[in-house]
Image (cartoon, rainbow, N blue to C red):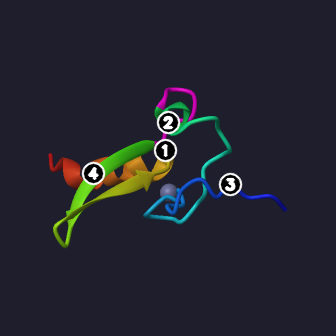
Amino acid sequence: VATSTTGSEEIKCVDCGRSPPPTDTNYTLIGARHGWRLKRAESDGRTVMAWYCPSCWQAQRKRAGGS
Ligand SMILES: [Zn+2]
């Protein structure tokens, strides 16, 4: 099994832990085709990236939505 080791960060949905489908770039994931979302968050003075799969992103928005 060959795995990419280009970065130290593994892309996973922070909510359900699902891995995204393999794509050429992260930008492909964020696009309409895959529907993943990348959110910046501050943690311990560092900026961290939080990935959400399409379904968790929707659930999260509903939760945060209020109304
Ligand atoms: Zn998810």
Precedes in sequence: disc 2 or disc 4 = 2
Query: Helix, strand, or loop for circle 2?
Result: loop
Whole-percent x, y for residue 61 in the image:
29, 47
In primary-sequence order, the first of circles 4 and 3 is 3
Name the N-terminal-most of marks 4 and 1.
4
Q: Nearer the viewer, mark 3 or mark 1?
A: 3
Q: Magenta segment, which residues? A: 31-36
Dominant secondary structure, magenta: loop
Residue marked by disc 2: 35
Circle nearer the N terminus (2, 1): 2
Q: Quadrant of residue 22?
A: top right
The x and y percentages for residue 33 are: 57, 28
Please tell me whether mark 1 sits on a helix, a strand or a loop: helix
Instruction: Judge depth for marks 4 and 1 and give the one in front.
Output: 4
Q: Which residue is mark 1?
A: 54
Q: Give the amino acid at mark 3.
A: Ser
**Discs 2, 1 touching: Cβ within 8 Å:** yes
- Which label's residue is closer to the chain start, 3 or 2? 3
Q: x, y percentage for residue 40?
A: 27, 51
Left or right: where 34 falls relative to 67: right
* Residue 30 placement, left or right of 44: right
Identify residue for label 4. Answer: 40
Question: Could you give the CA–CA distance between mark 4 and mark 3, rounded to whole angstroms?
Answer: 23 Å
* Residue at horizontal 43 percent and vertical 52 percent from the top: 52
Check disc 4: other Cα within 10 Å, few if <14, some if 14-19, many if 20+: few
In magenta stretch: residue 32: yes
Q: In the displayed image of the protein, which residue is found farthest to the right?
A: 1
